[in-house]
Amino acid sequence: MRTHISPARWLPTMAVILIAMIGTTACAEPVDFELPDVKGVKHKLSDYRGKWVVVNYWATWCPPCLEELPELVIFHETHKDKDAVVIGINFEEVDTDKLKKFIDNYSISYTVLRSAPGPSGVLGSIPGLPTSFMINPKGEVVGKQVGQVTGKSIEKFMGEESGSAK
């Protein structure tokens, strides 16, 4: 005998589970990866230890990605010589020359790496674009945002995480 459970009963539970899954991305150990940039030069996440790193998965065809690009550039320029950097991971199949022109046209000043698209990236699942991971100065994943971010939201997160680590 099958019992029917109404959506009104299981939807709130599923929402809590999904939020918990998205919100609990912290790792106890430092993470690392190596990916090429648009010139083929390999970059390691561990090269940025000691700074906060925003790892932003994006694509040239993604409207929300394009909307957040100026925020990421400003955040990177403001913080790169102090406490944080942005690394963009282009998550699509696109011609290298086209991507280089795109980077120039949008004045992207942070490092852009390349990765083949799929259900996950080097740091975990990518349910949609843009998706950003926050890596603390120790190299640990401490946050994940599916959807757009702002410089202010990144700064707020860094402040909250730094305060809770004390």
Image: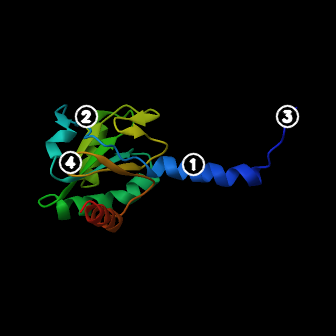
- Residue at image point 50% right, 46% down: 21
Give the mark, 3 or 2, whose residue is nearer the N terminus. 3
Which kind of residue does numbered mark 2 sit on?
Phe
Q: Residues within 10 Å of mark 3 (few under 14, many from 20)?
A: few
> Which quadrant of the view contains residue 66?
bottom left
Give the mark, 3 or 4, whose residue is nearer the N terminus. 3
- Residue at image point 30% right, 63% down: 164
The residue where tag 4 is placed is 138
Give the mark, 4 or 1, whose residue is nearer the N terminus. 1
Q: Nearer the viewer, mark 3 or mark 2?
A: 3
Task: Check if mark 2's residue and mark 1's residue have beta carbons within 8 Å.
Answer: no
The residue where tag 3 is placed is 2
Mark 3 and mark 2: span between their CA atoms? Answer: 47 Å
Q: Residue placed farthest to the front in the image?
A: 166
SS type, badge 4 = loop
Which kind of residue does numbered mark 1 sit on?
Ile
Task: Check if mark 3's residue and mark 4's residue have beta carbons within 8 Å.
Answer: no
- Residue 17 has which mark? 1
Mark 2 and mark 4: span between their CA atoms? Answer: 14 Å
Give the mark, 2 or 4, whose residue is nearer the N terminus. 2
The residue where tag 2 is placed is 33
What percent of the width, then of the height, locates residue 77?
19, 61
Q: Residue placed farthest to the right in the image?
A: 1
- On screen, residue 38 versus residue 144, left or right, reads left
Mark 1 and mark 3: span between their CA atoms? Answer: 24 Å
Which kind of residue does numbered mark 4 sit on?
Lys
What percent of the width, then of the height, locates residue 99?
30, 41
